[in-house]
Image (cartoon, grey):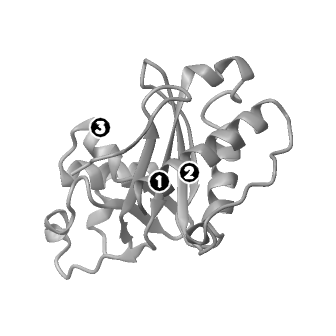
Amino acid sequence: MNDQEGAMAVKLARRAIDAETRDLDIDRIDVPDGFRGKSGAFVTLKTFPGDELRGCIGYPEPVFPLAEAILRAAQGACHDPRFPPLRPEELDQVVVEVSVLTPPEELKVPDRKEVPKAILIGRDGLIMERGMYRGLLLPQVPVEWEWDATTFLEQACMKAGLTPDMWLDRRTKIFTFQAEIFHEESPYGQILRERTQ
């Protein structure tokens, strides 16, 4: 994804958020062919200038065309169940970030104690799956929190509702994925590519 497409992804999310928050229909948007292929995507809202999480919703699997995944994730981020619904007066106090994901791949390491060596902080996102329990952390999260690979694994387990050491259990599936990340520098401001590594 080039920088121009990344900027378009963030603008698409921003339009969806503005419309959703104001209870308006979103206008039809023409998108390049690259947005028609199926892809996972997440939309993250953060307070500005406080940089506190305000909402994050997405689709890890490539089940929707990219444009639709971004629109759905943006609408969902306005109603993240961890927070009150986003209000219109907050629109110029949040910045929008879009993560376009590669398909998740199961990480198969024979010795579970060696798993942290297979994870590169800043490149990999994690999904933990055990039965009905599932949790996902985007690649930028351990960078922001300055976690090492072991802490990242433990936090992904807890996100899934598991105990922190469950990544060591062979019945827990671990998936990795990568993401291209673009975000507003300030509300409605310049759009930048995130450098996480």
What is the C-alpha distance between the residues marked 1 and 3?
Answer: 25 Å
Measured in 3D between alpha carbons, the distance from the residue under mark 2 to the one under mark 3, in whole angstroms, is 24 Å
The residues tagged by marks 2 and 1 sit, at their Cα atoms, a distance apart of 6 Å
Residue position marked by numbered label 2 in the rendering: 8
Task: From the viewer's side, name the closer residue of 67 and 7.
Answer: 7
Q: Is residue 189 above or below residue 99?
A: above
Residue 144: assigned label: 3
190 sits to left or right of 63: left
Quarter holding residue 115: bottom left
Q: Amino acid at mark 2?
A: Met
Along the polypeptide, which appears first: circle 2 or circle 3? 2
Q: Residue at x 42, y 63 (%)?
A: 127
The image position of residue 150, as x and y in percent, is 20, 54
Q: Secondary structure at mark 3?
A: helix
Question: Against 63, is 116 above or below?
Answer: above
Q: Residues within 10 Å of mark 2 (few under 14, many from 20)?
A: some
The residue identified by callout 1 is: 4
Q: How many marks?
A: 3
Name the residue located 41 percent from the left edge and 60 percent from the top edge. 2
Residue mark closest to the camera, 1 vs 3: 1
Find residue 182 and report its horizontal and vertical position in percent: 43, 47
Could you tell me the amino acid type at mark 1? Gln
